[in-house]
Amino acid sequence: MIPVYNIEQGTDEWMALRVGNPSASKFSDIITTKGEPSKSAKKYMQTLAAERITGQRESSFQSASMTRGIEMEEEACALFEMLHDVTVEHVGLCYLNEDKNIIASPDGLIGLDGGIEIKCPLAHTHIDYMLKGKVPTEYFAQVQGSLYVTGREFWWFMSYFPGLPSFIVKVERDEDFISKLAIQLDSFVHGIDDVVKEIKEYEE
């Protein structure tokens, strides 16, 4: 893992480092929870290829609830630190290796072995997470992907809504899934390179 501490998540500089690179938050567009290629992989690959060629990150819609969730993360993080008597270290992003083409942007790193992903959904979604009692399926690849990119041993998943009990679960590495993810990511990154090369041939 290669951490980048000197930038803040959400800034233009941070966005620029993400251009054209698959990120853990989108790993579910590359691989399913069963370790199979996602049906969304082709679209995501072409999106990243376009970003590499143009140097511009494709804009994405951010709803009011999404904005609210981002704004509440700091509050949720402070609560987690108090409940678990730990310090959450904030980081801009983490690269898998020196190639710097696979990344994760953790909500925080904890000690030498842990990390955390914080979600602040609407109340009904938060309660649904609590009743199911496990990491939501839509975030499985993100959490395991963060473990893969950072090389950490465990990850906390926290769902927070003011006035309701927090839902916090500790996630261990799923080595079988991570091995499949590594294979899919390697193929995916090479696929981006191939698409970029083919598109650039039109300029010649």
Image (tube, rainbow, N blue to C red):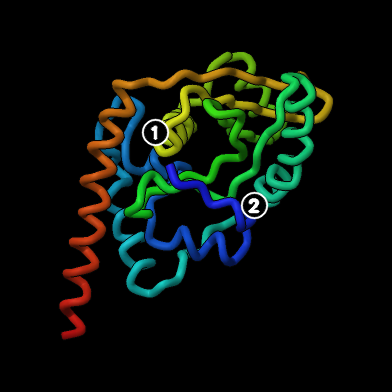
Residue that sits furthest to the right in the current view: 163
| x, y percent for residue 28 | 39, 38
User: In which quadrant of the rendered image does the N terminus lie?
Assistant: top left
Q: Residues within 10 Å of mark 1 (few under 14, many from 20)?
A: many
Q: Nearer the viewer, residue 193 or 122?
A: 193
Q: Left or right: where does residue 132 sit relative to residue 36?
A: right
The x and y percentages for residue 189 are: 26, 52
Relative height, residue 158 to residue 60 (above, below): above
User: In this rendering, is residue 193 above or below 133?
Assistant: below
Give the total of numbered labels. 2
Residue 198 as seen in the image, left or right of residue 144: left
Give the position of the C terminus as an image quadrant: bottom left
Q: Residues within 10 Å of mark 2 (few under 14, many from 20)?
A: few
Amino acid type, mark 2: Ser
Q: Secondary structure at mark 2?
A: loop
Please tell me which of labels 2 and 1 falls first in the chain.
2
Q: Mark 1 = which residue?
A: 148
Name which quarter of the figure residue 149 lies in: top left
Answer yes or no: is residue 32 visible: yes
Q: Which residue is mark 2?
A: 63
